[in-house]
Image: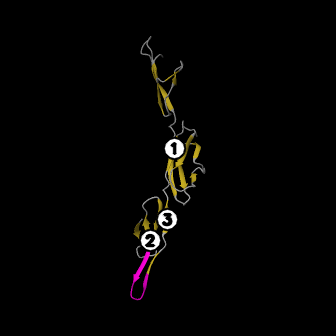
């Protein structure tokens, strides 16, 4: 490790070279004419753990207004055992039945280190729409109907009275 601060005091700050087991010892050397002390301490062994590292996976809400979102956390670093806590009150690694919104995740490792992250579960916008109609210009011609739809999630399908289709236009009015 590298001495960062505290030289000549009884409290020092060491920057360790990364995770693993490290040791440090100190020595005292006073050469004043009235006080002569010299000595080396026993080695102080320190175990430096990896920082808590984790990945969160989210399944977003399928349709507006539903509570079928979920999230799960996979912890990759830190010192086990871990305590996981979601803002819902759940202490499980995976939660489900979520509405769209923001959820806070807090992970505490065995050393008391804590990390938090906001997890966003998205919800598609509400499906809404209307039909634009263009009436036939003259007898014997066809009018047109066109669906104007916003929101929803995924591919839209329309039923113009002859089964479902992906076409938002019907031209046999």
User: Residue at the spot x=49%, y=66% of the render?
Assistant: 45
For marks 2 and 1 on the same chain, the one whose residue lies earlier in the sequence: 2
The answer to whether 2 is drawn above or below residue 121 in the figure is below
User: Whole-percent x and y of residue 112?
Assistant: 54, 60
User: Whole-percent x and y of residue 164?
Assistant: 53, 22
Secondary structure beneath dot 1 equals strand
Real-space CA distance between mark 3 and mark 2, rounded to the nearest whole angstrom: 14 Å
The numbered mark at residue 57 is 1
Give the mark toward the camera: 3 or 2. 3
Judge by depth and name the residue closer to the eye, 106 or 97.
106
For marks 1 and 3 on the same chain, the one whose residue lies earlier in the sequence: 3
Start and end of the magenta stretch?
26-37
Residue at the bottom extreme? 34
Contact? badges 2 and 1 (CB < 8 Å):
no
- Mark 3 surroundings within 10 Å by alpha-carbon count, few (fewer than 14), some (14 through 19), many (20 or more): few
For marks 3 and 2 on the same chain, the one whose residue lies earlier in the sequence: 2
Q: Is residue 87 left or right of residue 6?
A: right
The answer to whether 173 is drawn above or below residue 104 in the figure is above
């Amino acid at each position: 490790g590298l001495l960062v601060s505290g030289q000549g005091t009884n409290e020092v700050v060491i920057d360790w070279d990364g995770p693993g087991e490290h040791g440090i010892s100190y020595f005292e050397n006073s050469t004043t004419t009235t006080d002569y002390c010299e000595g080396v301490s026993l080695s102080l062994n320190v175990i430096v753990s990896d920082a808590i590292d984790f990945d969160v996976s989210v399944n977003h809400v399928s349709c507006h207004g539903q509570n079928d979102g979920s999230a799960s956390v996979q912890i990759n670093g830190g010192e086990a055992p871990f305590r996981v806590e979601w803002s819902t009150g759940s202490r499980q690694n995976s939660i489900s039945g979520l509405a769209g919104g923001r959820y806070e995740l807090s992970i505490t490792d065995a050393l008391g280190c804590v990390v938090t992250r906001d997890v966003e579960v998205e919800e598609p916008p509400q499906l809404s729409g209307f039909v634009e109609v263009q009436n036939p210009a003259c007898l014997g011609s066809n009018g047109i109907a066109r669906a104007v739809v916003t929101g929803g999630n995924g591919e839209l399908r329309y039923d113009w009275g002859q089964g479902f289709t992906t076409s938002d236009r019907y031209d046999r009015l």
